[in-house]
Amino acid sequence: MRVALHTHGCRLNQSETDAMEAALVAAGHDIADGPEDAEVYVLNSCTITHQADADARASIRRAKRRNPAVRVLVTGCYANGDPEAVAAMDEVDGVLGNGEKDALTDALSRLKPAVAAPNAFVQVTALKKRTTFTALAAATPRRRTRSLLKVQDGCNYRCSFCIVPQVRGRSRSLTIEDVVAQARSLVDAGAPEIVLTGIHLGTYGRDLRPRVRLADLVAAILPVLGPKDTGTRLRLSSLDPHEVDDDLIALVAEHAPQVCRYFHLPVQSGDPQVLRAMRRGHTAEDFAALTAKLAAKIPGVGIGTDVIVGFPGETDAAFENTYALLRDAPVAYHHVFTYSIRKGTAAATMPDQVPPAVKAARNKALRELSHRQTEAFAAGFEGQSLDAVIERGRGAHPMALADNYVRVPLVEGRPSVGERTTVDIERRDDSRVGVGPA
């Protein structure tokens, strides 16, 4: 069959799409670029907000409009969270839960010829306390240079704004031996960079026996990456501030740039009352202390964060606390989210919801601050050389992605896309450097 795959949401979803695509190819199927050229359209969906659900429905309907004969199979978090609603859509032929993604190739045989109102099958297993780790082998992506390696899934936390634990289950980890084996296969395939990813990466290994830490995993992967300056780089995806320990910091400091000098640390708020209402595991003081330590111990480190504006009960004073925290911390980038009510979460029924106009103004203020910090951070590397992986970019020139997430459009030379190299940073009138989220 010719199968088109489309991903919504987080990097973990993308890593699973890469793995499903590789499994389909291994089983003899062909990969199409879009639904108009496919027999089956697979949507790997997100459900982090109600808008994400709406986006999934829109993608499903759009695929069917482009190709009325295509059969539609929906997986991912929206499929797991509300399988009945997804299956009730006239356009949908099958629904697979997150725990069934490894059964995608078998599910294709269950799809019936497309009809006006198909009777969709539903294969979604309840995410119980002892859910197993879904075995999806990491794969090198067709269109991207960096390979995503899923090492952890699920979350045991209960942040009041988040629906993810309900659709991903409890935290579970891939063993160090299995991670190392998958990392080795990606290195052998020529991946210039591997990104360790998970729903809650900082809790990696807590469920394993014997219990291990993320630092132990990084140390185990290092020997398979090849030479420090020319082998494969290793990057960490998001970590909660209270989950970054001294051993992990020391590993990054010692092995940079092969272990990328970048930490993405979702703070969500800089106000103590809002953080308590969010049920976060850190304080603003924790974040400030950690970012200062990282900047001191790892020269040139890039630090990004996530922040939510307009959370219920966020007063003007509370927002100012957040603004001041981010302004004064050595942060290069923050991804700003505007809070929206998510049914099924504790925050949805909290009082003191913030008016939309106020939320929009706060979002704008933080995005402008982030832009200034990004420019200032990147400008600090003018005249220096940085370790980089060459990406395709969006304009006439390829883009170099440095280990600390400085992005540099290449205006001279034509290195190969996917090559790991060293780039000299210069400021030019027609080009700008910048950073973005890991």
Image (cartoon, rainbow, N blue to C red):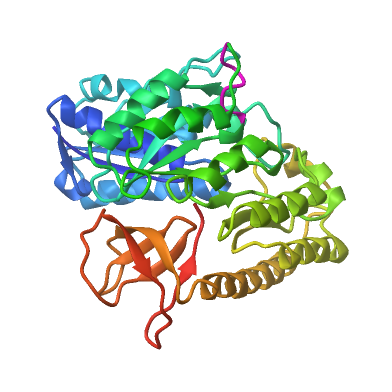
Q: Is residue 382 left or right of residue 286?
A: left
Write the residue at 67% across / 38% down.
246
Q: Position of residue 360 (x, y in %)?
A: 67, 68
Q: Position of residue 75 (x, y in %)?
A: 39, 32
On the question of residue 90 being in view, the answer is no
On the question of residue 418 being in view, the answer is yes
Q: Is residue 21 left or right of residue 46?
A: left
Quarter that holds the N terminus = top left
Nearest the viewer among 362 and 91 is: 362
**Looking at the image, residue 165 lies above or below residue 324:** above
Magenta stretch holds residue 213: no
Q: Quadrant of residue 208?
A: top right
Q: Position of residue 100 (x, y in %)?
A: 39, 21
Write the residue at 22% across / 72% down.
413
Q: Is residue 230 left or right of residue 97?
A: left
Write the residue at 58% across / 58% down.
299
Chief secondary structure of the magenta portion: loop
Magenta stretch holds residue 204: yes
- Magenta segment range? 203-209
Q: Position of residue 332 (x, y in %)?
A: 59, 64
Q: Residue furthest bottom?
A: 429
Q: Quadrant of residue 370?
A: bottom right
